[in-house]
Amino acid sequence: MTETLDLIVIGAGMAGINAAKKAAGAGWSVAIVDELPYGGTCALRGCDPKKMLRAGAEAIDAARLLKGKGVAGDTRIDWPALMEHKESFTDPVPENMEDGLKQAGVKTLHGSARFTAEDRLGIEGHGEFTFKHALIATGAKPRPLGFPGADRLIDSTEFLNLPNLPERIVFVGGGYISFEFAHIAARAGAEVTILDHGKQQLKMFDPDLVDMLLERSRAVGIEIIANAAPDRIDSAGDMERVTYSVDGKSHVKEADLVVHGAGRVPAVDCLDLSAAGIEAEHGGVKVEEWLQSTSNPRVYAAGDAAASPGKPLTPVAVFEGKIATSNMLKNKQTAPDYTGVPSVAFTIPELARVGMLEEEARETGDVEVSFADTSNWFSQKRLGETHAGAKIISDENGKILGAHMFGPDYAELINIFSLAIKLGLTVDQVKTMPAAYPTGASDIGSMF
């Protein structure tokens, strides 16, 4: 006889953990399952460990920018020690997460999961469970690559656990992962190349600011090759030979390590969705606006596993998980509000955006675009920073539609514009904000 649960959550990342706690707090019988350690990509294999490693790279960069301006001597990254620093955060996470779930009354399970019927889930080592509701929150995985030798690439998880940093690294792909890791590796002394299949890198960000980032990246020794299509990767003794084509001409790049940075896809193909009558779309679970499966009303999805309008970001996964659970608990059809969700590429310095790109905004009507090269402003001058800029987009009534920034600490500053867009504030309203001086926020009034 199978155990029947009010809710079973598949995936113990931020979306799943928050959802499970919320349902258990409402008195539901809840279980959560994951074949990987609890905590999910962000806490264990993505955002947080990446930012821990970035701290070392930031320190190196800061010292180099101020060399001859009051800072003397050479600094370097001790990679094993930096990795140990990272692990001081990541290692306790799984146990802490599981303990918190248990305290909340959630049954914690470990193993792979597969649907066996519309209302049943089989879990390796635990048998079958019948559920009244299920939440799929399995996140994403690296996009499969089809060229010969693609299996020789390591993924982002393996990069974040490298015991030692190789001397020559090639990143395949021109998105977040490649650029963020490339900036860390370059400051740690590696020779770094990014091969991007497209003409434009980081397409989700403002192209003018991306150009600034590319200049800054090349200035620290990162080689960026656009229109580069990987053809194959071969082992050549103790190194890798990456053969790629640019405009029909073949080239070879030798490296000690090749890293997959060519995007991620929903991690749902191992769940046997068809056994539960769950439709897929764009690789993820096809859902209604309120995150309920379009084909199996018992099932909901959140985060990267859902084919929703939400961006593949941790905050989005968290509030989708909470909203999906609330809809289950209250039998409602509340859709998430994605207004004002910011995105940041944590390069050095960082590239940030919230709201519409300039091209998107112009399609809506008349807009005002304010662009400021802030590289000579006090906020950058004091740090020795050479590249920084901001672009603010508003409509004919002054309502802020988008904000785009590249510079030190702009990942924090973008949150002010996130709130402004969320609340529908105008340029004039934001300009009246009194800010502590001298801070990055005190620059806002001059960005319009």
Image: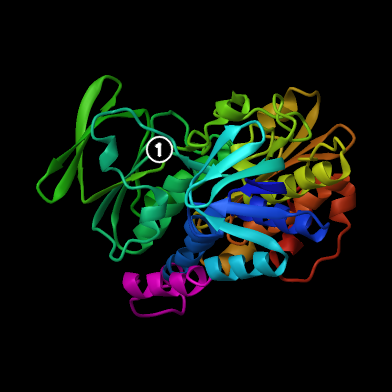
Residue at 85% x, 54% y is 431
Q: Secondary structure at mark 1?
A: loop
Q: Quadrant of residue 117?
A: top right
Q: Position of residue 191 (x, y in %)?
A: 27, 54
Left or right side of 283 for 435 = right
Q: Quadrant of residue 107?
A: bottom right
Q: Position of residue 419 (x, y in %)?
A: 81, 52
- Among all residues in the image, which is located at the extreme front? 1
Q: Nearer the viewer, residue 433 or 319?
A: 319
Above or below, 267 relative to 364 = below
Residue at 47% x, 56% y is 45
Left or right side of 261 for 207 = right
Return the residue at label 1: 173
Residue at 38% x, 34% y is 196
Q: Is residue 278 visible?
A: no
The magenta region covers 63-92
Q: Position of residue 215 (x, y in %)?
A: 44, 46
Q: Is residue 71 visible?
A: yes
